[in-house]
Image: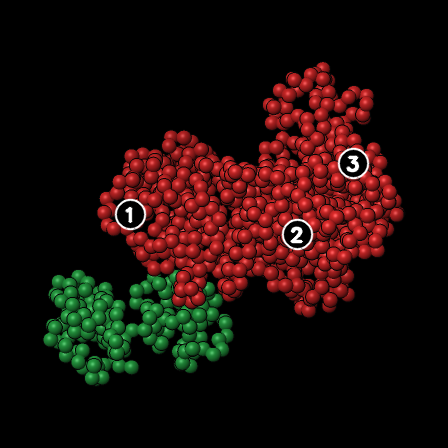
Chain colours: A green, B red
Amino acid sequence: MSTITNSIFTSATAARFDHLVTLYPVKRSALIPMLLYAQDEVGYVSDAVVTEIAQRLDLLELDVRNVLSYYSMLRTKPAGKYNVQVCTNISCMLRGGYEILDHCKHKLGIGHKEVTEDGTFSLEEVECIGACCWAPAMQVNYDFHDNLTTVKVDEIIETYRAGQGKDVK
Amino acid sequence: MPDVKFTVDGKQLTAPAGTLLIDACKAAGIEIPAFCYYPGLSLQAACRMCVVRQEKVPKLQTACTTTVAEGQVFTTESPEIAQARKATIQLLLGNHPLDCPVCDAGGECELQDMTFKYGAADSFYAEPKNHREEQKWSPVVYFDRPRCILCYRCVRMCGEGMDVFALGIQNRGSSAVIAPNIPAQQSPDHLAHLDCEQCGMCIDACPVGALTSGAYRYKTRPWEMNHVATVCTHCGDGCKTTLGVRSTSDGAEIVRGDNRDKSGINGDFLCNKGRYAFDFANSPERITSPLVRQADASLKEVSWEEAFHHTGKKLRELRDAKGGKSIGVIGGNRLTNEEAYLLQKFARTVLGTNNIDHHRTADYVTFAQALSGQKGRTASLRDTQSYPAVLIVGGDPTNQAPGTAWNLRTDVRLNKARLYVANTEEIKLRRQAKAFLQLAPYGYGALAAYLAGDAASASSAATDSNALNSFRDAVKAEENLLILIGSELRGADLKRLIEFGLTIPSAKFALLSDYVNSRGAADMGLLPDMLPGYVPVTNPGPYAEQNAPTTPGLDMLQIFEAASRGELSALYVVNSNPTSRYNIDPAALKDTFVVVHEMFMTETAQLADVILPAANLYEKAGSVTNSYGDLQLVQKAGDRAGVRTDFEMIVRVADKMGADIKSLVPFGKSTPGVRAAGTLGDMGQSRGAQAGEADRHAVWLTANNLEPKLSPFDPFAILDEIQRLVPGYNLLRLQLISGNDQHLEPNALSFRSAAEESASRSRRDLVLPSGDTLFTSGTLGRFSPALNEVQRYQANEPLIQIHTAAE
C-alpha cells in the first residue's frame, strides 16, 4: 500500500482508509466508499481529495474522476451547511413532492444543486430516499423528515436556520 | 483450440473453438458491422451494432462477444436484424450532428456507411441536440463532443494499446463524455487537455469524426487526396505509413500521415512523428535552388547546370591534384539503400577514397560479425509481436522506437509474452515486464559478461545481486527468446551478449538504431573500413571488379581531424549534419571545398561551398532497411519544385567529373561482350530463346509490375547490382514492389584472415546515439512545425501522470 504522508484527512479518517483498502481483493474496490467518507469529512470531493485517493488506491486521477462523475450523490463543489434533499420520485411525486421542492426553491431562493449566498442551505432534487410510506419526504444532511407539508417545511428550515436541527456538524 | 463447425447464413464455416463470431465471419467474407469492436483490444459490446440471431437463443446476440462452438447456427442479415441495427443507429444519431459535409471523417466514417446501409437518417428523436463546441485537447488532438458515439475505442486504445491511460469516460447516460486526463479546473487556460504521448492512435481508432487530427482537420476530403503507401522517415522501426497527398502550385503537398493501410510491419501503429511530422516537407524554409559560394563569401542561386558543372570540375581538380585520400564523404541516415550504395560506390570508384562514414547510431558491424555464419538468428520487427519471450538490454523503445514498444505491449497483452528488461534507467516498458533488472550505471558490459558466465562482473552489473541472479536464470530458462539490444552495447560487449544469446537454441537478435535507414547505411557500406554487406575493404571479394582502394579510409572524426590539419581538400555531405552532431569547429573546414545535399540551411549547409537542394524520403523512391533488417519499398508521395533526389544529384556530379555512368549505375541495355554479364540492367538478354526481344520482355516486365531501367536515375537499376553483390541482400523483387516487408540477414562473412579478425577487435567505437525522444527527430525534427508545437505544449503540460500509472 502506498504510504501517505501529510494526509489531508483527519487521523481517524486516514486510519479508516488505511483499513478500508485491506478489505477488498483489489484495492480499487475501496474507491466508492472512500469517496463517500471523504465527502462527508471535507464536504465535497475536492481536487486534493481526488489526488490523495488516487494515491491511496494506485489509480490515476482520471480513473477517480471517471467514477466520481458517474454518481450524482458525489459532488465536486461545496454544499451548504444544511443540504436539503427533496424526493420527487413516484410516491413523493403523487403526494406533492414537486410542491415541496418548489416551496423550498422559493423559500431558500435557490434552485437545484445551488447554495444560498450565506452558505447555510443547499437544495437538491433527489431520487427515492426510501421513505415512500410517509411521502412526501426530504432529507437534510443525513436526517429524515416525512409527511411533509409546506408549513412543516417552513418549520424545519427555521429550526435548522436557528442551529437546532439534528445531524448538525 | 480444435476447429469447430458452425453455420452462418446457411454457409458452413470452420474456425478454432473460442474464436469470436465477428472474426470468424470476417475471415469467411461475411461482414458484421461494429463500432465498438476493435481487433486486439478488450471487448466492450457497447454499440449493439453487431447483433445477430443465434438459433435457440431468445434474444439477439452480439457477434463481438459470442465465441463459436460446434453446431451453432447464426443469421447475420434478416429484416429483424436490420431493424435492430437501424434502431441502434437512430439512437446514435439522436445527438450526432449531421455535419458530414464539413466533418473530417466524411467519406471514411463508419457511422455514415452504416446510416447509408440501414437507412436511418430520419429519426424519431425530435429533442434539440446537445451541442458542445469542439475542444483542442492538444496541438494534435481535437475533440468534437456531439459527434462522439461512445464506442470506447479511444479509451481502450490509449490504455491497453499505448499504456498511457489518458482518456476516460465521465458522467453517465446521455451526458456521458470522453474526458482527457487534465481536467479544465486544473489547467491554466481552464480548458481540458491531454497529457500523453500524442500518438494520435485515438484518432485512427475513432469510427466517426469525434477525434480529429490537428494536422489534417478541415483541410481536405479523403477522395481529393492521393494515398501513397511508403515508409516513415523518422526512427529505426521503419513503420509503413499512408500519406495523403494533394497537388499544390509547386509540387505535391503531404496533408496527412496515417495508417489506414494496416498491412505493414507496424500493424495498427503510428506514433506522433509518423502521424504528424511529415510537415517539414512543406516547410517554406526549404532550399529550392542550388547555391554556390561566391568570391565574396556569399551564397548565390545558380542554375542546376552551373552547380553541377562547378561541383564536378572542382572535385575532379582536387582529386587529380591532391588525390582521393584528401576527400571525405559523409552520408545520411535517411538515404535509401540505393542512394547509400551509390554514394559509397561514387566515393570509392569516382572520388577514389575510402574516407566515407555516416552518423552511426548502433554498432552494426560488430552485430554482423558476431552473427557471421548464422542463419535465422536475426529478428524481424514482426517477431516482436509474436515471440513468447523477449529480452531487452538497453535502449528505451517507448521513446526511441515506438513501433517496437507497441508490438511488445501487444505481444504481452495478447500472447502473454514474457518480457525481461535490463536497463540502467526505469524505462516505461518495465511496466509490461515479467522481470525488470535495474543495472548499475554503465553496467551493460558487465551484464553481458555476467550472462556469459563471468560471475566476477556481477557487482559492476547491478547492485541487487539476487535480482541479477534470478534474472539470469529466468532468461536462460527461455527457449524461444528474442533479444533486443540497445545502442549502449557495442564492440566487445555486444559480441559477448550475442555469444551468450547463441547458447539459447532459438534465440533471435535485433540491434536497435535511431533512424529510418541507419541499418541500411551500415549495410550499404557507408563505412571507411567496410564495403556493402560488411565485406572488409582490404579484401573486396565480389567488389574486386570495381577497383576501389583497399586501405581503410578515415572515419567521421578522422575526416574532421584531417580537415583541421588542413589535409582535407573536399568534403561531400549527403543529407547529414555532422557539424552540429559532432560539434565541429566551423574554422576546421575553411580550406575545404564542401558540397552539401540538404533540405534546410543547417549548421553544415552554412559552411558549404555548394548546396544542392535535396528531396527527402517522402519525395523519392527506393528501399530502406529498418533496425531489424526488414527491407521495405519507399514510394514517392510529396513533391517540391526545385529539389532533386540525392540519387540523381550524385549521378549528375559523377557525370560532370567525367566518370563512366554506365559502370556507376548499370542502366539500359548491355552490349553483349563489352561488359561482363550482369553488370547492366537485364533487358531480357539472359532469358534464353527470348534474348534481345526487348519488346516482348517489356510485356513480361509490365505483367510482373516491373519496369525497364532505362534511366541512370532509376534506383532500381542499382538495386540489381545490390542484389547481385551485397551478401544477404538476395531480396525478392515482387515482394518489394508489392509493398510487403521482407527480412534480410546481411551477416558478415567469416573472417578470412587473422588480420581481419584483429581489425575487428581494434575498431573504434564511433556510435553516437541520437538521443531523440518521442517528439524530436535529429536535425530534421527541428524543421517540423508539428514537432515544435508538441514540444512546447508538453513542456507546459509536464508529464505528471503518464509515467506513474497503476500496475
Q: Secondary structure at mark 2?
A: loop
Q: Determine the residue located farthest toward the top in the rendered image.
A: B689
In the image, what residue occupies the spot 46% across and 36% down?
Answer: B224
Measure the C-alpha gap from mark 1 to mark 2. Answer: 54 Å
Q: Within 10 angstroms of label 1, few (less than 14), some, or many (20 or more) residues?
A: many
What's under tag 2, amino acid-wise?
Thr
Camera-nearest residue between B674 and B739:
B674
Q: Quadrant of the C terminus of chain A?
A: bottom left
In the image, what residue occupies the spot 81% across and 37% down?
Answer: B349
Placement of B154 over or under B435, stated as above or below: above
Placement of B656 over or under A74, stated as above or below: above
Q: Secondary structure at mark 3?
A: loop
Q: Quadrant of residue A146?
A: bottom left
Image spot of residue B244 (x, y percent)? 51, 40
Q: Quadrant of residue B671?
A: top right
Image spot of residue B600 (x, y percent)? 63, 49
Image spot of residue A141 (x, y percent)? 26, 75
Mark 1 belongs to chain: B
What's under tag 1, amino acid-wise?
Gly
In the image, what residue occupies the spot 18% across and 82% down?
Answer: A159
Q: Quadrant of residue A75?
A: bottom left
Mark 2 belongs to chain: B
In the image, what residue occupies the spot 32% across and 73% down?
Answer: A78
Depth-wise, is mark 1 or mark 2 nearer the camera?
2
Measure the C-alpha gap from mark 1 to mark 3. Answer: 71 Å
Q: Within 10 angstroms of label 2, few (less than 14), some, or many (20 or more) residues?
A: many
The answer to the question of whether label 1 and label 2 lie on touching residues, with beta carbons closer than 8 A, is no
Res B619 visible: yes
Q: Which residue is mark 1?
A: B94
Query: Where residue B657 is drawn, which disc sits there?
Result: 3
What's under tag 3, amino acid-wise?
Met
Q: Which residue is mark 2?
A: B602
